[in-house]
Image: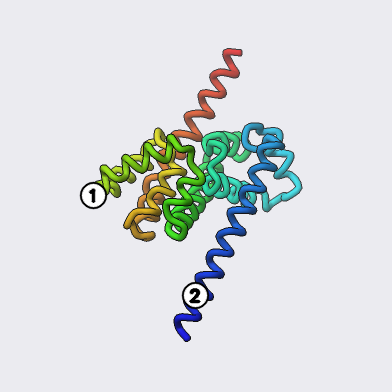
Amino acid sequence: MKQKSKKKYSIIIHISAAVTVTASVCFLIYAYRKGLLNSQEAMQEFLEPFGVWAPLVFVLIQAVQVVVPILPGAIGCVIGVVMFGPVKAFIFNYVGICMGSVGAFLLAKMYGRPLLEFIASPRLYKRYMGWLNRNQKNFDKLFAVAIFLPVAPDDFLCYLAGVTKMKLKKFTAIILLGKPAAIAMYSMGLELLLRRLLVLL
């Protein structure tokens, strides 16, 4: 009886994951066509009908773009700062990106390396799987450093962590502690650079 319940639970989890990913892909295709993640005006127009729920929708958008890493999340970070101000945008970006990061990790735990091979280019997959194989013992520390510094493909690294022996508790702790600095650098730094460029123009 317990075995049947466990199998049923596993099926439900896999179906839920498949539905979530499919919905995320569909939304990102829509977002790409509408220019939501590279145009402040388009994003504002999209969020306006949601009223007080707009921040929640923005958080979900940021979570989705991590699970389906098609567009760079840094763009969304900057748009958030412009739309909501630096403090609120930091909070919204932080919550959304952390949610998406945990989602990517769990998906990789369920589906393993074939999922990574599917979502990554052959070059990226080969490069990072080789790096993982060479650094199995030190992966946790290297992952923490990479998450703290906004220089690596963080979204793919979350998937990569999912195929290691790292536990969810440790992964979540690294994400929660390491993401604030990277998000602040992306959000504030790029927004400041954008304003400087606009002044020069």
Quadrant of res 133: top left
Which residue is drawn at the image coordinates 40% and 50% (left, top)? Answer: 175
* Label drawn at residue 79: none
| Residue for badge 2 | 7
**Three-letter amino acid code of the residue under disc 1:** Lys
Q: Residue furthest top?
A: 200
Q: Mark 1 or 2 closer to N-term?
A: 2
List x then y, in percent, for residue 3. Answer: 45, 81
List x then y, in percent, for residue 112. Answer: 43, 55
**Three-letter amino acid code of the residue under disc 2:** Lys
Q: Nearer the viewer, residue 28 or 90?
A: 28
List x then y, in percent, for residue 34. Answer: 71, 37
Q: Nearer the viewer, residue 130 or 13?
A: 130
| Residue for badge 1 | 137
Instruction: Indicate left or right for 60 with 164 as reference.
Output: right
List x then y, in percent, for residue 17. Answer: 55, 60
Q: Residue furthest bottom?
A: 1
| Rendered position, 171 above or below 69 | below
Instruction: Indicate left or right for 153 with 144 as reference.
Output: right
Which residue is drawn at the image coordinates 26% and 42% (left, top)? Answer: 134
Q: Residue furthest right?
A: 49
Q: Nearer the viewer, residue 89 or 2?
A: 2
